[in-house]
Image (cartoon, helix red, strand yellow):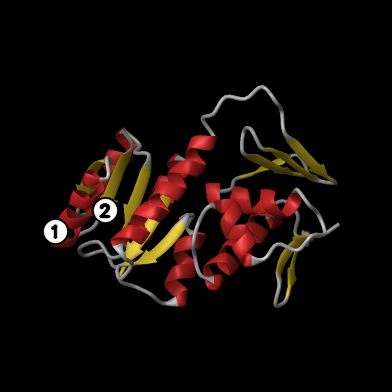
Amino acid sequence: MKKIVIVEDERAIRENYIDVLKKHGYDVLGYDNRPDAQAAFESDLPDLAIIDIGLQEEIDGGFTLCQSLRALSPTLPIIFLTARDSDFDTVCGLRMGADDYLTKDVSLPHLIARIAALFRRSDLMLQPTEKVELIQHGALSIDKNKMQVFWQENLVELTVTEFWMVYALAKRPGHVKSRHDLMDEAQVVVDDSTITSHIKRIRKKFMQFDNTFDCINTVYGMGYRWGA
């Protein structure tokens, strides 16, 4: 049974989500503040975390919690579920390392589908395989089995969503991948601005090791491609 932790300070909302997720077969725990949730994460990591941004007196407590959780695990699926719908907050959430950013007007079936998609991707990491699948293009090296990406022999720490986007682009250099293609590869359903935010964050991670990195090209009106 997959374990989900939801961090939401409004009791009625938290209990409603807990009830729905339990009915779908998940083991669910809830917290209403950042310190308690952070202590729980440090003691025992869940399989997925759902976090609100404003937590009691902490206006951006969810952002802080996401950063701490991402430091504990670079691949644990994290979803922001919040009433804050500005582009600024969305970009901040994704830059903090979240895999998805949803607003509270999202339908429950849509939320369940997004959770299931994240779990499908995470489960791929646990599947044993004897075949080594590597991609190498110049300074880029990708080990699909281990879900690791290297640039100039440096490990680029990517979230699960970011890994599949890089893999989708790099496995066919020069071929344009639309935003819909990238969503299919990453098994997420998000809007165009969210895909754009993921791409920007991926570029910055590569540029930590190479400030001249320019291999992810924007093809305006079409999507993205991995350049030469």
Which secondary structure, mark 1? helix
Q: Does 121 sit left or right of 171 as displayed? A: left
Q: Nearer the viewer, residue 9 or 172?
A: 172
Position of residue 173 relative to residue 46, above or below, is: below
Q: Is residue 199 visible?
A: yes
Single out the residue that lies furthest toward the top.
Answer: 130
Q: Picture coordinates of residue 142 (x, y %)?
A: 71, 40
Q: Quadrant of the C terminus?
A: bottom right
Mark 2–mark 1 distance (CA, rounded to whole Å): 10 Å
Q: Is residue 77 visible?
A: no
Residue position for label 1? 11
User: Residue at horizontal 49%, vertical 65%?
Assistant: 190
Q: Picture coordinates of residue 162 (x, y %)?
A: 59, 52
Quadrant hosting residue 157: top right
Q: Does 16 sit left or right of 141 as displayed? A: left
Looking at the rendered structure, the kind of residue marked 2 is Val
Position of residue 70 relative to residue 56, above or below, is: above
Residue position for label 2? 7
Q: Residues within 10 Å of mark 2 (few under 14, many from 20)?
A: many
